[in-house]
Image: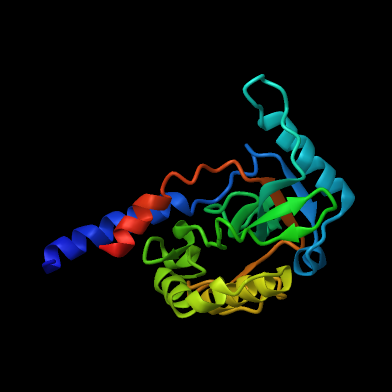
């Protein structure tokens, strides 16, 4: 494949990746609050668990138009959200919406409130591409797309060995720290704008019902092969 075709293929792969790794709009999708310890330990509070299953019941129906009853649901955890800062009753950062998620962790939640890694689909954490260089201005970037690709490429063996939530926790914290150059437990994150080098983050984390349709899976595999 010549350089021109390689460039075109790389462009279309990046376009598909950007569409697959989008953020979630807090104003549109219902969410439930959990704290940092719940995510790391792999067990969420009963109120959030009940809320997610109630949301799933409203959104999932079988052929007879009756709610399906499943012992688990697919969820997305917004693990890192930029905090909205006000000064004199005005937002300091006009370019960033309230509750802007920058790091998402997909998972499975069972009826007992336990979090599980999706071994079947192997859905992995992501940063929305709009917050990764070179697709944005430095003042909105928390890392680079190359750092994500490098970490994933160098940890294929670790992904295959993820069996427990503890294994998954080590992985999603490692990815975050490699890309963001900030400790996972810290409530600030590096901003690639030299004039404003940090974003402050929310203390809470947020759980959403996973409504995504992974229609891009085979297309991504094709571009990766090419």
Q: Quadrant of residue 125?
A: bottom right
| x, y percent for residue 201 | 68, 65
**Figure quadrant of the N terminus:** bottom left
**Figure quadrant of the C terminus:** bottom left
| x, y percent for residue 70 | 74, 40
Q: Say above or below: 164 vs 71.
A: below
Tell me the residue at 76%/69% (across/down).
40
Taking the image as drawn, is residue 197 in sight? no
Q: Quadrant of residue 173?
A: bottom right
Task: Give the camera-side residue of 70 and 25.
Answer: 70
| x, y percent for residue 156 | 48, 75
Q: Is residue 222 left or right of residue 138?
A: left
Q: Is residue 159 left or right of residue 56?
A: left
Tell me the residue at 64%/44% (across/down).
26
Task: Give the camera-side residue of 31 and 67.
Answer: 67
Task: Give the camera-side residue of 34 and 119.
Answer: 119
Tell me the residue at 73%/73% (across/down).
166
């Amino acid at each position: 494949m010549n350089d021109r075709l390689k460039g075109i293929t790389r462009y279309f792969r990046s376009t598909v990746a950007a569409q697959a790794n989008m953020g979630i709009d807090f104003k549109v999708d219902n969410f439930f609050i959990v704290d940092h310890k719940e995510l790391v330990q792999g067990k969420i509070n009963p109120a959030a668990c009940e809320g997610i299953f109630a949301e799933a019941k409203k959104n999932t129906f079988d052929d007879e138009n009756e709610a399906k009853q499943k012992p688990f649901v697919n969820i997305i955890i917004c693990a890192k959200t930029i905090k909205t800062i006000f000064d004199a009753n005005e937002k300091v950062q006009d370019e960033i919406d309230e509750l802007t998620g920058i790091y998402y962790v997909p998972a499975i939640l069972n009826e007992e409130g336990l979090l599980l890694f999706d071994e079947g689909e192997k859905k992995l954490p992501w940063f929305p591409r709009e917050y990764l260089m070179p697709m944005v201005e430095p003042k909105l970037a928390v890392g680079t797309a190359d750092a994500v690709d490098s970490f994933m490429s160098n940890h294929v063996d670790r992904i295959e060995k993820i069996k427990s939530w503890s294994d998954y926790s080590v992985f999603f914290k490692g990815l975050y720290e490699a890309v963001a150059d900030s400790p996972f437990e810290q409530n600030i994150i590096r901003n690639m704008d030299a004039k404003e080098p940090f974003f402050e983050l929310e203390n809470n984390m947020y759980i959403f019902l996973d409504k995504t349709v992974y229609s891009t899976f085979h297309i991504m595999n094709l571009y990766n092969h090419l």
